[in-house]
């Protein structure tokens, strides 16, 4: 991740999908400390699927790549299709990405508030 990325110029509404409770709560705290609003955190794909049945009013999504042993990519297709920019968070780093997702920003776990700010700053919002 390029830590020289410029942070977003305004508060964002961020959809968070993370199945590890402590990481989800930490990410929520980081985002709120950075001045952003959190949708979620969503901790399983069943709940994410239900959430995506209606339009989601998010400026960006931070998605764990592996949620409950399943890959997030089919849901990422729906989120990207709705015009919501995506940042992936994964313990596998960029090596966990494949296909069209290789060009998306990746925040490697474990991350800090600086990593999250840089990941959001890597997007054009």
Image (tube, helix red, strand yellow):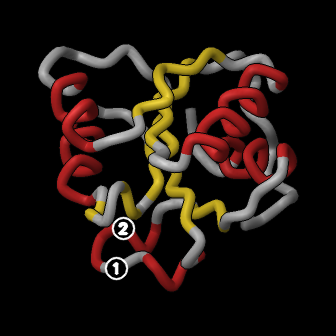
Q: Is residue 54 left or right of residue 111?
A: left
Numbered disc 2: secondary structure? helix
- The residue at the point 56 percent across, 58 percent down is 89
Residue at the limit of the structure toward the front, as seen here? 21
- The residue at the point 39 percent across, 63 percent down is 66
Q: Quadrant of residue 55?
A: top left
User: Which residue is label 2 attached to?
Assistant: 101
User: Which residue is label 1 attached to?
Assistant: 98
Q: Is residue 33 left or right of residue 79?
A: right
On the image, the x and y values in percent for residue 26 come to: 73, 38
**Tag 2 and tag 1, C-beta contact below 8 Å:** yes
**Marks 2 and 1, Cα distance to the nearest angstrom?**
6 Å
Front one among 107 and 48: 48
Q: Quadrant of the N terminus?
A: bottom right
Q: Residues within 10 Å of mark 2 (few under 14, many from 20)?
A: some
Q: Quadrant of residue 67?
A: bottom left
- The residue at the point 87 percent across, 57 percent down is 4
Q: Is residue 82 visible?
A: no
Relative to 87, residue 7 above or below: above
Q: Is residue 105 left or right of residue 36?
A: left
């Amino acid at each position: 991740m390029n830590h020289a990325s410029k942070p977003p110029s305004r508060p964002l509404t961020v959809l968070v999908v993370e199945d590890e409770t402590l990481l989800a709560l930490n990410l929520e705290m980081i985002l709120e400390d950075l001045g952003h609003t959190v949708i979620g955190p969503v901790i399983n794909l069943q709940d994410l699927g239900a959430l995506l049945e209606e339009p989601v009013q998010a400026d960006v999504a931070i998605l764990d790549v592996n949620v409950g042993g399943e890959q997030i990519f089919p849901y990422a297709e729906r989120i990207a299709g709705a015009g919501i920019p995506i940042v992936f968070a994964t313990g596998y780093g960029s090596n966990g990405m494949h296909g069209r997702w290789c060009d998306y920003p990746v925040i490697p776990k474990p991350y800090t508030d600086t990593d999250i700010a840089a990941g959001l700053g890597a997007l054009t919002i």
